[in-house]
Image (tube, rainbow, N blue to C red):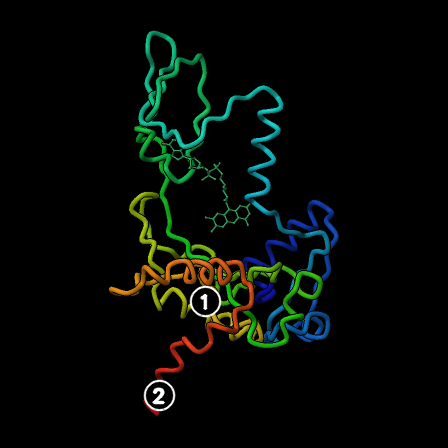
Amino acid sequence: MIGRRDGVLVAGALRSAQEHHLAHEMLTADAVHSRFPGFALPDDMMAFFEPRAGVLDPEGCVDAHLRLAEAGGAEVHTSEPVEEWRYDRGRIRVVTAKSEYDAARLAFCAGAWTPELLDDEAVDLHVERQVMHWFTPARDAELFTPANCPIAMIEYAPDRVFYFVPDSGDGVKAAIHHEGETTTADAVRRQVDDEDVGRVSRLLATYLPGAAGPRRREDVLIVSACSGHGFKFASAIGEAVADLLMKVDRPDLLPFGRQRLVSQKA
Ligand SMILES: Cc1cc2nc3c(=O)[nH]c(=O)nc-3n(C[C@H](O)[C@H](O)[C@H](O)COP(=O)(O)OP(=O)(O)OC[C@H]3O[C@@H](n4cnc5c(N)ncnc54)[C@H](O)[C@@H]3O)c2cc1C
């Protein structure tokens, strides 16, 4: 947790560690630089370092919980959205896209979709758009691996926090904590625009400059239909596409790169 000593983040983490006797160290900006050289902090920032802090792999966790639930006798139904639920003569009736269920009790846990399914004015939930970004470090990639760099939250302005997770194989993760627009889970604006990227890139360039390389994108390959002459090449193109997606080196595609058009023009 990084920030001014009297900011909410460092002071709050310190108070919590003291109250609950958690192992921690307070580091000056200089101490952070010599121990974790990927960071570039101004002198008036401090770091609260917690050696036992870690990160969970949420997909792995969800998978493990589902498997354990099934092993314990639960029946798991996926791809079956709940459309409505209601009380029905002392029981609960749950209507899904596939079926209807009768239950004595219901635990309701629809996350960000809760407001749509829970017609209860007493429940005051709002959904906020959050955008996460992954970047390939621009230099010194080894400084940003979990062995050399902790997870960090940085209070970059009073009560405004940006966070960073080192590279475990998919690039470094960086995002702003909150500050997103209020929305709904279905209507959320999913396009990531230049402003979203710019805000996080600038913070990364300020506090972890070597990590601020190109932003990573999904592994989506756009394959063209090749105008009126593509069919006969389909098997060769298919093979090349499969290799590219599987990250198999394909030097024989180099003569077809977009770059050749630039050099022809020159
Ligand atoms: C950007 C971000 C960063 C976060 N970082 C952290 C962190 O560092 N540490 C931490 O502890 N927590 C973090 N959280 C919070 C954490 O993700 C949530 O607290 C947690 O996922 C809530 O779990 P949940 O099961 O209540 O809801 P969710 O994980 O949202 O699950 C709700 C489920 O309900 C399903 N559902 C919705 N509607 C229907 C329907 N009609 N029928 C059937 N199923 C439906 C959805 O598909 C979803 O699978 C973060 C959250 C965000 C957004």
Task: Select label 2 or label 1 by which is in front.
Answer: 2
Mark 1 packing: few (<14 Cα in 10 Å), some, or many (20+)?
Answer: many
From this view, report whether residue 210 is shown above or below residue 135. below
Which residue corresponds to the image point at 66% horizontal and 70% vertical from the top-left?
143
Residue labelled with disc 2: 264
**Image side of residue 38 versus residue 125, left or right:** right
Asked whether residue 69 appears in the rendered view, the answer is yes
- Tag 1's secondary structure? helix
Residue 120, located in which quarter of the rendered image?
top left
Q: Amino acid at mark 1?
A: Val
Q: Amino acid at mark 2?
A: Gln
Residue 100 picture location, percent across and down:
35, 17
Residue labelled with disc 1: 200
Residue furthest out toward the bottom = 266
Which residue corresponds to the image point at 67% horizontal and 74% vertical from the top-left?
37
Residue 43, located in which quarter of the rendered image?
bottom right
Residue furthest out toward the front = 232
Near-viewer residue (45 or 70): 70
Q: Is mark 1 within 8 Å of ligand 1?
A: no
Residue furthest out toward the left = 228
Residue 264 picture location, percent across and down:
35, 88
Which residue corresponds to the image point at 67% horizontal and 52% vertical from the top-left?
53
* Quadrant of the frame with the C terminus: bottom left
